[in-house]
Image (tube, rainbow, N blue to C red):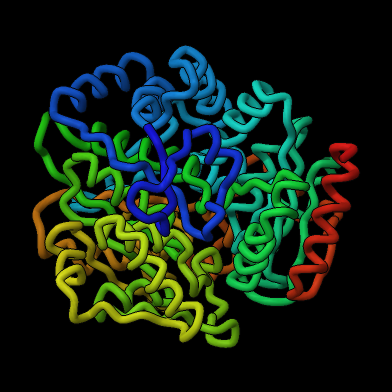
Amino acid sequence: MRYISTRADSGAASKSFCDILLEGLAPDGGLYLPVSYPHVDADTLERWRAVLAQQGYAGLAAEVLQLFIDDIPAADLREICERAYTAAKFSDPQIVPVTHIGDGPLWLGHLSNGPTAAFKDMAMQLLGELFEYELGRRDDWLTILGATSGDTGSSAEYALRGRARLSVVMLTPAGRMTPFQQAQMFGLDDPNIVNVCVDGVFDDCQDLVKAVNSDAEFKARWHIGAVNSINWARLVAQIVYYVNCWLRMTAGPGEEISFAVPTGNFGNICAGHIARCMGLPIKRLILATNENDVLDEFLHTGVYRVRSAQETLATSSPSMDISKASNFERFIADLFGREGAKVRELFRQVASTGSFDISGTPEFSRIRNQYGFVSGHSHHSDRVATIGRLWREHEVLIDPHTADGVHVAEEFASSGSEPIVVLETALPVKFAETIREATGSLPPQPARFAGIEDSPRRTVEIGNDADELKNLVAATAGAVHNA
């Protein structure tokens, strides 16, 4: 399996999985994708069903990942998966159980049982093991530079803390995360972890990361890598739980289910798109946004229009307060048949004018008909009402982002007969005030988080300035790695 950039022309040189694992963003500013997706037939799916039953989630993960990773021996890859996905880490022997919401068509895929109570743990625990394995093979080190709107940062830091060959510089938008999210990250005192509060919104943080990555000399000098979903390894890990949910929801080949996915950065649902392209029987991919509805607007109009920092709203589902969906470029590359020049042109338009419009193209009509995408959005009142109703009627407690997914899924439930799995994004404890508003009570707090919000906070504050960030990255990497 070889990988190329979304912006590469036909015939461009390809790279191996382990090379792009450590590289993150492609040198041309694009994102890596397989040259072509592997195809999964009915026989393979039934074999995987047996693997899941006999070897659990870790065994399934190894089977799926082998389709994308041919430069790690199969035995080593299986051991990596077995270390990443344990019942001790994920509080459930199934790792990702699926449960019914009442007796209707909606189900919950529980992705948030990991160390930081967020679905990002599903990829980050694997990523930590992959990084350590490959850096050990190469006798090398890596500086992880990332940005988070809420959950990516803590998931990455808990997966990478204490690993000798890795340091982490994680950017957050100052004042935009919940107190619990801040405590999870800012309470860490590991010497290889540095939390940075940026004067701006998440998109500003993401732009700073891309700006540093675009300086090839600096990136090479300080061994800059990525854990954001711009890193292909994040997406390939997420494909596994789509397969897991389909296997748990079906009895045999050909049965279709749909997924409702809360998303702001298009990473989570992009993994579902790839799983569907591989042949997993997914009928619809139901995209749910909050008030920051850039992706919902695109799927309805064909106009992709990013918002400024001033237009990006602070909402009660803060991890989706994103107006530049970095993973969206991967889908656009697929939509236009991997035509690198076209992808470059569209995102050049975004950089210069803030938008592009494909509403009159044949490609736009294929988004729903060929790729199965539909979408909707949710507001604060919707998510509060949804959380309260599910708790009163079914004693099912969900977080605000998952509530966005449930709200939008319910809009589409009557237009099809298939089950819809709503992908949970986090445990309610991370958004206590919204839960109290919706139910009248604070959510239960798992014992492992007792007293977390009382811990001292350790952060560095910077302006929205790439040079200031570079100085911090160099100082951090120099100190941790004696570079």
Q: Is residue 187 visible?
A: yes
Give the quarter of the image for residue 191: top right
Please tell me how many numbered marks the rendered image carries.
0
- Residue 381 position, x and y percent, is 42, 78
Q: Residue furthest front?
A: 11
Q: In this picture, is 271 found above or below 314?
A: above
Image coords of residue 33 (percent x, y): 39, 47
Q: Is 352 on the left or on the right of 289, as rendered?
A: right
Q: Quadrant of the C terminus?
A: top right
Could you say where residue 345 lies in the image, as x and y percent from the top left? 39, 73
Residue 320 against residue 480 in the figure, above or below: below
Residue that appears at 80% across and 54% down:
473
Q: Residue at x 26, y 77 (%)?
A: 358
| Above or below, 67 relative to 272 | above
- In depth, the one of 448 and 20 nearer the eye is 20
Residue 418 x/y as whole percent: 13, 50
Residue at 41 percent of width and 51 percent of height: 424
The residue shown at (29%, 72%) is: 376
Taking the image as drawn, is residue 391 in sight? no
Using the image, determine if residue 4 lies above or below residue 400: above
Q: Which is more toward the observer, 37 or 88?
A: 37
- Left of 145 or right of it: where is 399? left
In the image shown, does 20 or 469 lie closer to the viewer? 20
